[in-house]
Amino acid sequence: MSAALAPHGVTNARILILSRHDYRTARRASVHFIAQKLAGRGHDVAFLSIGYSWLSRLRGDSRAGLDPRANRWETVDGLRAYLWRTRWHPVKMPVPDALTGWLFHRWAGMACPALDEAAATADLILIESGIAPALIRRVRAIAPHARIVYRATDLLATAGVPACIETTLQRQARDIDMVVVVARSMLPHFDSFDCPRIFIPHGVDLRNLRRPTVSPYDGPHNAVAVGSMLFDEGAIRTLAQAVPHFTFHMIGTPKHAFPSNVVLHDEMPFERTLPYIQHADVGIAAYLPAEASAYLADSSLKLMQYGAIGLPAVCPDFAVGEHGLRFGYRPGDADGMVQAFARAAQTRRRPAPTQDWGDVADRLVEVALG
């Protein structure tokens, strides 16, 4: 198979991705890597970021720096990126779910010619988990012949998405041609869907992960944690107090008061994050327990990246799965956390077999359009 072609002769597919993420931000999620690989294989990829307004700037949205470039297409890395800025958009508020649902309904109907035109010409529309299901009805009406694939990177309740979006997702199940999940344990959640349900796990950027970099650390004994999802600051505080000779580097995590051996870093591009992961002694994925959070054993991108370079990792027991380099603890068990950290710190690196994002992109196109 040519590296520039998708499998089974599927070439030059027109693909629309709807996501809360924007392709141009420093923060990288799985959808960024997939979009880049799809574009690199010759597909016409339109990446449209949703759920953004002046309210986002007040709430510290990572896309705020793109505000002057909103509501117009830009070409980046061979794909087209668009930030849909509306007059307002629904945000989390202590209001009845029915009202939140009404607000999402109003928002989903706001004018956006860029969205409508991209959907009308798409062969494949990828709906990312988050608030994007609110737009399923709209894009199906515009694109009756397109393949609509819902890609579940998280269960909505676990990710804190308003319950009305789950209701909408279930209601619009008839408009979805396929569900793709990133963890096997997610599959039963979609038993009521009358469409194929496929497990395609995350990949990693193997070439980038394993390229030589210079250590960013000033001394030995460093642990690293990346990202904000379900972040358990109590676990970090416990470990930092119990292991004072280690320095704990938190990248893009929520800001809290920590011991002096915790260093807080702002969110940074993956290229700058990579050396912190490569040269750490221990990786940390301090997740809080949440509804159905066991799927993180398969879906946690940071844990997969740690494993791909052989970095021993500390995480809650529900995220360990069948991974030999992960050392688990029961959430809230301080002694267990410290013991897990000690085991990780004493373990030799050994990279785990992991698929590349190119494999994920190829598989996604194969099952959706092949």
Image (tube, rainbow, N blue to C red):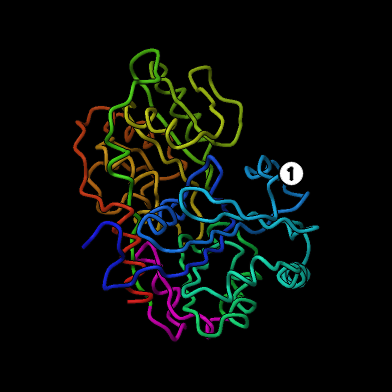
Q: Quadrant of the C terminus?
A: bottom left
Residue 285, horizontal then vertical, whole percent: 42, 41
State the quadrant of the N terminus: bottom left
Q: Kindly identify the amino acid type of the residue bearing the numbered disc 1.
A: Arg
At a point 39% along the width and 20% down the height, the residue shown is 246
Q: Residue at x 47, y 49 (%)?
A: 29
> Residue 225 sits in which quadrant?
top left
Q: Helix or strand or loop: what does disc 1 sit on? A: helix
Query: For this rendering, which residue is in front, 369 or 299?
Result: 369
User: Which portion, as a residue range, is magenta?
Assistant: 171-196
Of residues 166 and 18, the one nearer the viewer is: 18
Badge 1 is on which residue? 57
Could you say where residue 40 lies in the image, as x and y percent from the top left? 37, 54
* Residue at the outermost top position: 219
When the figure is inspected, residue 309 is found, relative to residue 111, above or below; the finding is above
Give above or below for 42 relative to 136.
Answer: above
Q: Position of residue 87 (x, y in %)?
A: 80, 58
Q: How many marks?
A: 1
| Residue 313 coordinates in the image, percent (x, y) | 32, 38
* Left or right for 240, reference 25: left
